[in-house]
Image (cartoon, rainbow, N blue to C red):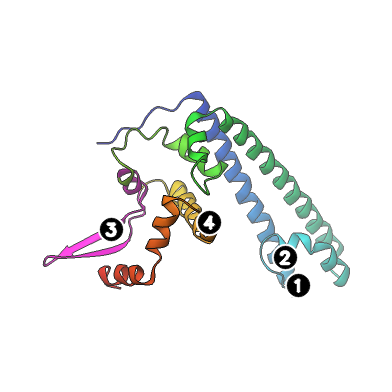
Amino acid sequence: MRFVQPRTESQQAMRALHRVRESLVQDKVKTTNQMHAFLLEFGISVPRGAAVISRLSTILEDNSLPLYLSQLLLKLQQHYHYLVEQIKDLESQLKRKLDEDEVGQRLLSIPCVGTLTASTISTEIGDGKQYASSRDFAAATGLVPRQYSTGGRTTLLGISKRGNKKIRTLLVQCARVFIQKLEHQSGKLADWVRDLLLPEKQLCRHLCSGK
């Protein structure tokens, strides 16, 4: 049985900041999706996301939309900018909190780990002393492959995806960024990743997993 460490007041405060930030990010996505849907109903197709915000002035100039719809779209645009500012403010607060957090500072020393990842792990996991090894942490987070054994043959499947989805997602993003910047990285970690990415190593992993 694995026990969860009780959170400190600082960790609880950071967790609250994260939850409010996540809610605002979801609202931001909903806002652009609404604007995209309203325009699509009038035959105006624009890419999803922030593109509808940046192109709104041009869209309103080039198309004769009902006045009430134009006003509504402008209000949604203002709401989007408000959400962006609120998210930036919360991220600044998270950074200030992280500056006072010893565990968070150690996490920031890991290549490609930023404020959101470091503060999330520090808040949800703490110092990690409840795990005997890094593999135990990876297993608890769902980052190790599931295994299927039959007839003396072991087949590696996809990652188990157990545990904290948010931490798993952030760590995967960090790994992708590290790989994208691999040519500029140095040290044992970079050498290990380069070795894993060798064509013969990738072929071996595919054969072992039965894919």
Figure quadrant of the C terminus: bottom left
Of tags 2 and 3, which is closer to the observer? 3
Residue drawn at x 66%, y 52% as measured from the top left = 28
Residue count near mark 4 (Cα–Cα under 10 Å), binned few <14, some 14–19, many ≥20? some
Displayed quadrant of residue 41:
bottom right
Would you name the residue on which mark 2 appears? 38
Q: Report the Cα–Cα distance between label 1 and label 3.
A: 48 Å
Amino acid bearing label 3: Arg
Amino acid bearing label 1: Phe
Of callouts 1 and 3, which one flags the residue occurring earlier in the amino acid sequence?
1
Residue 180 in the image: state x and y as whole percent.
53, 61
Q: Is residue 61 magenta?
A: no
Which contiguous range is marked in magenta? 136-162
Residue drawn at x 49%, y 29% as measured from the top left = 102
Q: Report the Cα–Cα distance between label 1 and label 2.
A: 7 Å
Of callouts 2 and 4, which one flags the residue occurring earlier in the amino acid sequence?
2
Would you name the residue on which mark 1 appears? 42
SS type, badge 1: loop
Q: Is residue 171 left or right of residue 77?
A: left
Would you name the residue on which mark 3 appears? 146
| Mark 4 and mark 1 residues within 8 Å of each other at the beta carbon | no
Q: Is residue 54 above or below residue 131?
A: below
Outermost residue, front side: 187
Of callouts 2 and 3, which one flags the residue occurring earlier in the amino acid sequence?
2
Residue drawn at x 11%, y 67% as measured from the top left = 151
Residue 24 in the image: state x and y as whole percent.
63, 45
Would you name the residue on which mark 4 appears? 177
Outermost residue, bottom side: 43
